[in-house]
Image: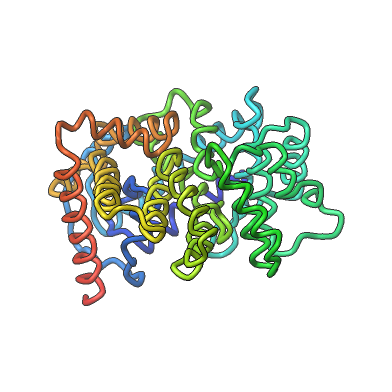
Amino acid sequence: MVFAVVVFAFLLFWWRNNQAPTQLLTPSITSPSALAAVQPPAPSKPAAINKPVKTIEVCGFGKVTLDDSSSAVVGAEIEARIAKDVIRWHSALLNSGDVRARAAGLFIDSKFDGDSVRTTPSPQSLHSLVQLAQETHDPAVYATALAACNGLKVASPGSSCEQISLQGWTKLDAGNAAPWLELAGAARAANDVATESAAFAQAVKATKVDGYNWSLFGFAEPDLPSDITPFERYQLSIQMIGIEAAMYSPQMPASFASRHCSADGVRNEIVRSQCSQLAELFVTKGTTVLEFAVGTSIGARTGWPEARVAALKEEKEALEAAWMQAEPDPAKPESEFSCEAAVRRNRFLHERAQLGEIAAARGAISLSGRTTAELAQSYREYLQRLIHDAEQRQVK
């Protein structure tokens, strides 16, 4: 029940501060780097509506007339149905035979505090999550447990979190750049130059980069209730992805790599060579658009040919545009709530969970029938519209 309260409160808080009444509970699918590109306007209260707006078809709920009073009722009805779905999903995760699914269930056993969501599990769940990491030696479970422990502002003496560490993750996942970069980031924060340099050197030798912080939904998706509507499935999915985002910290691989390979940092010949190798890893082996973008930026700083950097930037914008294809027609608000829109969004999210963000986007590009340049241009135009709309809302 605690988990249900978290999700419902998050839904309600997000809706109240960011959406007009006719948009209900449907945030857009987008990548982390796209989210960072637009500064949201200050929250404002929706204008009062004194007469019915329109009758729309809400997938799984039938025809609904939205006005000043019924919009809140519809929101409550959706929350009530999702409440049961969330409880069933959470229970299935905790009882799953897949250790990564169980780890996801334990990680999201969260509590709601005022107008913010904390993704720190209860002490009992945190203890179970750490135990699971130690018993299974699964690097993804171990990384999830570390993320949960990092969410603690002050770890109590004797806490289960003392039993796991970044060093432990590097031993389990030595060929992965992610734990080495996080270790280097922690060392940098502690002004430990020697450890930072040694850990960074190990990261450069890695053959993959995966912090698992964008994998939580992938671990949990197979246990989604099978009898829910496409609209409910999308609502549950997007909230899990929101919780994934809360796993992010300043020491995450891409963030630290960008700081270590700064314009000043790459003036050192050895660092520049290492950063160029790491950028290659991010661009060729990264699983997220954010890693791809950071790799491109670092590569540019280390002297990659301008033509290659320009081509990578264009591809990054095309990758962003691929996610836009899942979104409903903005000229038809009712399509936001249609089963057709929900099915399309769910397909993209499923492919993201199965293949990773970049591979899923590349698949969408190949099916689009459009060139990389065309898609990149459509993304730039889309971004300009977002910025313009945000500025207009601030003026009002």
Residue 79 in view of the camera: no
Q: Camera-side residue: 180 or 159? A: 180
Q: Camera-side residue: 275 or 59? A: 275
How many circles with numbers are drawn on the protein? 0
Query: Going by the image, does 69 lie left or right of 242?
Result: left
**Point 54% across, 45% down: residue:** 213
Give the vertical position of 61 relative to 121 (above or below). above
Q: Camera-side residue: 133 or 41? A: 133
**Point 70% across, 62% down: residue:** 194
Residue 262 in view of the camera: yes
* Quadrant in the picture for the C terminus: bottom left
Q: Residue furthest bottom?
A: 395
Query: Going by the image, does 287 lie left or right of 392?
Result: right
Give the vertical position of 241 relative to 69 (above or below). above
- Horizontal and vertical percent for residue 332? 14, 45
- Horizontal and vertical percent for residue 203? 59, 47
**Point 41% across, 48% down: residue:** 76
- Horizontal and vertical percent for residue 54? 16, 49
Query: Going by the image, does 241 lie left or right of 328?
Result: right
Give the vertical position of 358 relative to 167 (above or below). above
Q: Residue furthest front?
A: 269
Query: Going by the image, does 222 lie left or right of 26?
Result: right
Quarter of the image where one finds residue 44 = bottom left
* Quadrant in the picture for the N terminus: top right
Quarter of the image where one finds residue 92 = top right
